[in-house]
Image (cartoon, coloured by chain):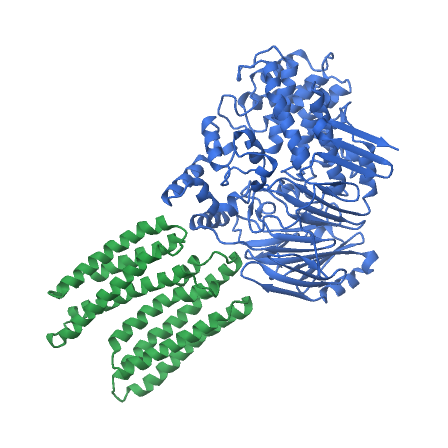
Amino acid sequence: MNSDGLYAQPGRVYLGENLTAAANLSILNSLRRIYNYEDCMDFEMNSLIRLLYLDINKSHVSSAVKDQVIDAFGRGKYWYTEPSRDTAIFFTENHQILYHTVELLVGQLFPNDTFTNSGMNGTAHVIHATPLVLRWLNWRAQFGFSEYHSNVYLNQDIVALVNLVDFADNEEIATKAAMILDIIAFDFAMNYYQNRYATSAGRTYDNKKVGTSMASPAGRDSTTEAAWIMLGIGNHTPGDANNLAAVALATSDHYAPPLILEAIANESLLFNEHKERNGLAVSEGPMYELSYTEADMMYWWGMMAYLIPETIDETYRILKHYNIDPMTACGPQILLDLFKFLAALKGQPLSVYIESLNLITGGVCLENANTYTYRTPYYQLSGVQDHQKGMNSMQEHIWQASLDDHAYVFTSSPGGLTKDFDALWVGGWKPRATLFENVGVIQYDRQAMPLEAEILIFLLNLFTGMKFYNHAYFPRWAFDEVVSVGKWTFGAKNGGYIALYSYEPATWKSNYELQVKGFKNAWIVELGSVEEYGSFTNFTGMISQSRVQVTPQAVGYDVRYVSPSQGLVSVAWDGPMTVNGTVIDLGPYARFDNAYCYQEFGSDTTIIEYDNKRLELYFHNATRFYQES
Amino acid sequence: MVVIGLYITRYGVGIGRYTINLIYGPIAYFFLALAGLLVIESIHRRLDVSPQNVIRQYKEFLLIVTLFTIGTLITTYNVWTYYLDVSVIIFIIGIAILWSVLWIYGVQARDGGFTSHLIVTLSFTLGLLYATILNGPQIPIYAILFFLTVSFLQLAREIIKSKTRNAATGKENSSIENKEDQNLKNVLGSLFLSLTFLIISIFSGICNPIFYLYFMLAVIFFMGFAIVRCWQSFRDRRNLRHVPLFLWFGILFELIAFILAI
């Protein structure tokens, strides 16, 4: 406990240490966000509520500080339905559970006190938050995470869930929260490679994926410390003492992952082939009894489905009814007005007009993600299969081939509407990524859009970094050896080998970026190892002599690649992927499909088995059962 | 027109191919169109029987062939490298045949005037069809209607421009008044045909009929003015004076209508 950061202080209290003056200052400074209803105040609130609960019947937090914290909670805002127009974002998947959790726990702690913003007392807040918490937990149980594999936001989910496990009076909530934590731990076991959450992600950031040198590598995944605590995978770093989820897990007396998950994590280090599905397609709402009205709107808003035909009218209504700043949801008011204006000009209902912008407004939706991971001792190839190809993405990371913590490769096509306009590596235009074991074909292209959308995108690309290219992240500084042969670029690290092919001419822009002009390209990736090929020279020789036939089509390509390890790999922009004539399953996948668990998508029962251990999670009756025979 | 043609047929084509066509299409068609415009010069030169034209005719012929070949080579490169449909090459051959036929007609019929107007018109408007074929072998019905609309309007404008130019330079005289009346009838016919195709286009499955309607009404206004003036010019040729300008606005709004329609 060597940090005076806010998030580390529950750790001090848990260990029976008094807070330092600097720590007290961190706490008091954090209250500004809560008083001003600023974005991400829920992160602070969850850490502070944990602090209060852990300090019950103790006095490691001074009364003066505690009183201030309580005052801030008393004046806090816990849901968008409460008065006040502000910059707080309530609607993303992680924000939802963070706010529901703190509302429930603060309400429990102060049942009779009146909260000034809502005018409700604590008990009323508990009554309000309970069904919302349960709804969120049930959605995750049945449909997984829309912010799938997020190396940033799963960390926020964890702290809320641990708070619920530790402090919720409602046993059903506490049990289900523990079950969701189990599922997150299982997800880590399936997708972590060494120290990295080395897979696709629904939401991430450039600084978590891109490093420029060994001295300045990509940022540590926010979830890595939590993965180490839960499963013992990866490694611990003292620098993460202020990590929200790690501190919550380390100070929890009521949650520990069942031993089966740690056993699986270690067993699957050497080999794993894993498929899973997270999230729904928007059109599947009625199939799972989800409406497009306010009653279920948080599911859709949680996956950023604000401006799609099914939800746009209700989105506009909710924003207006609750006086919500649209910037906290789906963009500036002027954009919403522009859509209405253009729809009126074209004589179309808004829901019909917005369909024409589907590449953008539909693309940013975190719809059903079928992710695939293939791991050996030397490498891991992981990505989301055939996912919204040619559509725009805010923050998605589609695929990654990893040889170690820093030596990994992926491609992207920046531009369009992204969360951060200076993002060059996450978000942008989604490819058709098709992966099978150690081979992947990734095609970039997209269809044209209405004139107003093309102009907007062109201007965005022009003024946010001349984004008229696609590229590969290939950090030469991280590999033992890198060579280029024709259209292939090869890398070697620790006995693992990677080969990356670019159909269009690629040039090195830096020691980590291979850039290709234009928006259309086909990339092929193949991984190998010293066990399969012997020397790196043999690997490069065999791959560079393999036959590659890439035929441009009106949209995308028709790719035929004779892989030395797999045989003929054939895939186009549409249609199946085949390997030696066998059609490869690109989804939709089951919720989990691997050597340890098979769960149909939409089911709320998860059974994980390994060796003589068995974990059973029954969400419909909140039963969590673990046994070792 | 090539850019507009590419734009109105962009759906179903990836941004990669679309961008490539945007680069190669206008450049290639520029040479094909220029060759067509030189055909006009060649016709007029053939109609002038003075002996010193023989060498010039030969050089002109070579220039036409060279320009057309450049346009063809660029197109062929585009087709070959990016696997476009062979119908693009067939279309190029069609243009070559068209320029040849019009040249022969112009010389044989000794009618440099109307043939020139036709070639100028088609040099401008065929670019739209060329572009649609670059994007794919199936030409949407609305693209054909747009082509006919703008072609007839452009043809009418070319004839009127020529007439007003002749009137300004004093070339008109009463001995060819019957022919002038015939030209006016051709203009009116073209305008009515253009108007017809303009209106039919709104029913041809365009994406934004409301947008198209706004500008269609503007085109009808300008064409209506032109029709009235043309009709009045049977009595007094001075009524034609502003007609080319109105037809120019008509074409402008027509092109905007095409762009916004899809």
Q: Residue extending furthest right?
A: A629
A602 to B164, vertically: above or below: above
Residue A366, position as x, y percentages in the image = 59, 41
A13 to A299, vertically: above or below: above
Q: Which of A464/A233 is in front?
A: A233
Residue A408, position as x, y percentages in the image = 71, 49
Q: Which of A359/B30 is in front?
A: A359
Q: Residue extending furthest bottom?
A: B51
Residue B203, position as x, y percentages in the image = 36, 55
Which residue sits at x=52%, y=28%? A87
For residue B62, side relative to residue A382 (left or right): left
For residue B238, side relative to residue A602 (left or right): left
Is the N terminus of chain A in the top left, top right, bottom left or bottom right quadrant? top right
Which residue sits at x=48%, y=37%? A312
Q: Quadrant of residue A215?
A: top right
Residue A555, position as x, y percentages in the image = 55, 58
Q: Quadrant of residue A204?
A: top right
Q: Give the total number of marks visible in the rendering.
A: 0
Q: Quadrant of residue A296?
A: top right
For residue A317, side relative to residue A156 (left or right): left
- Residue B127 visible in the snapshot: yes
Chain drawn green, letter? Answer: B
Q: Chain A is which colour?
A: blue
Is the C terminus of chain A in the top left, top right, bottom left or bottom right quadrant? top right
- Residue A5 visible in the snapshot: no
Which residue sits at x=39%, y=64%? B128
A510 to B152, vertically: above or below: above
